[in-house]
Image: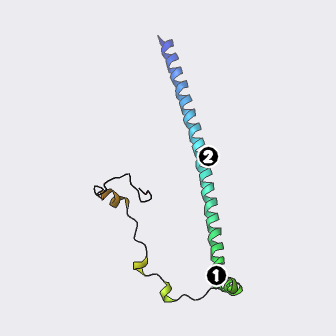
Amino acid sequence: MLKPFNFLLLVAMIGAATVTYQIKHHAEEKLGEVRSLQAQIQLERQTIDLLEADWSLLNQPVRLERLVERFQEDLQLGNIDPPQIAQPNELPQKLLQIEELIAQDFDDFADPTITGSVVR
């Protein structure tokens, strides 16, 4: 009677050890993925910092002024007059939000297959 019970416990112990090893292996794989992603994130942050530094160097007013003077004949740049600046009523209307589109009543359309680009 004791031998079958011991055999059953041995099988259960081997099964538990196998499951534990699989879980450990899976966790180590995930840890490797996390470390790889952290390295990629760090690289991206460093790249962003470098690009921001380049951007600030490229946008220095002294540098831009020299470029304007150098290419004045080609670009024909000038000062901005106040009428050239758009007024709020001249700007395009805001885009409809999805909630507004859903709430609209489309019963006014006689034929929903007609679009603005189709000529009959």
- Contact flag, marks 1 and 2 (Cβ < 8 Å): no
- Percent position (x, y) of residue 23? 54, 36
Q: Is residue 33 visible?
A: yes
Kindly indicate the quadrant of the structure image that contains residue 30.
top right
**Mark number for residue 42?**
none
- Percent position (x, y) of residue 102? 33, 56
Identified at 51% across, 12% down, the residue is: 3
Answer with left or right where residue 108 lies relative to residue 84: left
Kindly indicate the quadrant of the structure image that contains residue 103.
bottom left
Direction right: furthest residue = 70
Q: Tell me the SS state at disc 2.
A: helix
Residue 66, compared with residue 52, is above or below; it is below
Q: Distance from label 1 to label 2 (Cα)?
A: 43 Å
Direction top: furthest residue = 1
Mark found first going from the N terminus, 1 or 2 = 2
Q: Provide the residue designation for mark 1.
A: 60
Q: Amino acid at mark 1?
A: Gln
Residue 74, compared with residue 98, is above or below; it is below
Q: Residues within 10 Å of mark 1 (few under 14, many from 20)?
A: few
Residue 9, compared with residue 77, is above or below; it is above
Identified at 68% across, 86% down, the residue is: 72
Q: Provide the residue designation for mark 2.
A: 32
Q: Amino acid at mark 2?
A: Gly
Residue 61, compared with residue 52, is above or below; it is below
Identified at 60% across, 54% down, the residue is: 38
Q: Tell me the SS state at disc 1.
A: loop
